[in-house]
């Protein structure tokens, strides 16, 4: 298979960056909304109090324990988007270097993505040697 495509131009890359940013923003809004709704439900049930804070947002951004936990949660939501879609792309396309052999960097990235994949036991076949690696 010898398909050579021209490299993506500046505007195509800029469009992809804006597109991914909008998706990540939507995911972060949903993830944050779930936490705020959960906090409001706990306050309504009388299990949690905002005590010195005004509302859920103030608690989640100002509390010494909840603020780092909330930031970590949002970072994991952000990273899970990219891990999922990079895994999707790595499985959909076979990436080769210019000489037709699979690069070790690509194999390393695919192995790291397999750690997070539901199908982590699928072998990666290197086309140059037709050997399977796990």
Image: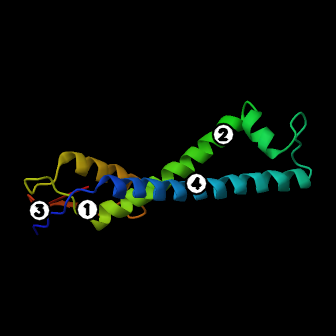
Q: Badges 1 and 2: C-beta atoms under 8 Å apart?
A: no
> Which residue has dot 1 on it?
123
Q: How far apart in space, not on screen, are marks 4 and 1 (Cα)? A: 34 Å
Mark 4 secondary-structure assignment: helix
Mark 2 secondary-structure assignment: helix
User: Which quadrant does the N terminus fall into?
Assistant: bottom left
- In this rendering, position of residue 23 left or right of residue 109: right
Closer to the eye: label 1 or 2: 2
Residue 22, given in percent of the width and then of the height, sits at 54, 57
Residue 51, given in percent of the width and then of the height, sits at 91, 37
Mark 1 burial class by Cα count in 10 Å: few <14, some 14-19, many 20+: few
Mark 2 burial class by Cα count in 10 Å: few <14, some 14-19, many 20+: some
> Which residue has dot 2 on it?
69
Q: Residue furthest top?
A: 64
> Which residue has dot 3 on it?
130
Residue 116 vertical placement versus 56 (above, below): below
Q: Earlier in the sequence, mark 1 or mark 3?
A: 1
Q: Earlier in the sequence, mark 4 or mark 2?
A: 4
User: Which quadrant does the C terminus fall into?
Assistant: bottom left
> Which residue has dot 4 on it?
25
Q: How far apart in space, not on screen, are marks 1 and 2 (Cα)? A: 35 Å
């Amino acid at each position: 298979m010898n398909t050579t495509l021209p490299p993506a131009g500046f505007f195509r890359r800029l469009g992809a960056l804006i597109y991914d940013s909008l998706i990540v923003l939507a995911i972060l809004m949903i993830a944050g909304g779930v936490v705020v709704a959960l906090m409001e439900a706990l306050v309504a049930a009388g299990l949690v109090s905002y005590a010195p804070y005004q509302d859920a947002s103030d608690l989640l951004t100002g509390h010494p324990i909840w603020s780092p936990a909330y930031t970590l949660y949002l970072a994991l939501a952000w990273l899970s988007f990219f891990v999922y879609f990079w895994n999707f792309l790595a499985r959909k396309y076979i990436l080769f270097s210019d000489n037709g052999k699979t690069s070790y960097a690509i194999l390393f990235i695919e192995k790291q993505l397999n750690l997070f994949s539901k199908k982590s036991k699928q072998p990666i076949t290197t086309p140059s040697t037709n050997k399977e690696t796990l």
